[in-house]
Amino acid sequence: MRKLKLYLETSVWNYYYADDTPEKRDITREFFSVIESFEIFVADPVRVEFSAAPPVICDRLLAMVAKYKPVNLDATEEIDDLAAKYLESALPSAAELDALHIAYATYYELDFVISWNMKHIANIGRQEKVRAVNRMSGYTKELSLISPFEVSRYAI
């Protein structure tokens, strides 16, 4: 059986060290303890968001990426175009990087975007709007937008 393909949005990496939110931190660590059950992916928007963090945190996050070795997805013009469509009807105009995360996962036909960003990514309302944009844009694979909680205890 093939492994599920997961795009790990920036918040998943960040919450690994979120001592101020121990419940999400612990769920995130549980998720990473079963990560070998999945194929994992990231793209440049993750690194862009890492670079906005203080240097010590950025270094820690980059070390995690080096440890877990997700596949890095290449940028394309189609991804930028799809992200723009999300910003027109599925996400707030200020959520540019969130739109890119979803567009990478859609373009590369991944199974899930994993995120702790419940406002812009991991919620049913956004998921339905994203799926509508995807169908209108010719993408037929159903993409799910979920939190690490929904994955960590159900690893294959």
Image: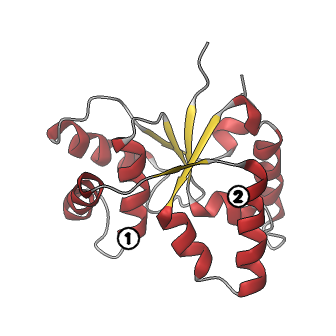
**Residue 141 in view:** yes
Q: Residue at x 70, y 58 (%)?
A: 65
Local SS, label 1? loop
Q: Residue at x 77, y 65 (%)?
A: 63
Q: Amino acid at mark 2?
A: Val
Residue density around tag 2, few if under 14, some if 14–19, many if 20 or more, within 10 Å: some
Residue density around tag 1, few if under 14, some if 14–19, many if 20 or more, within 10 Å: some
Farthest residue to the bottom: give it: 54
Residue 95 is marked as 1
**Residue 24 in view:** no
Q: Amino acid at mark 1?
A: Ala
Query: Quarter-wise, where is residue 115 in the image?
Result: bottom right
In the rendered view, tell whether residue 104 sits above or below residue 93. above
Local SS, label 2? helix
Farthest residue to the left: give it: 136
Q: Which residue is mark 2?
A: 65
Q: Return the residue nearer the eye: 126 or 76.
A: 76
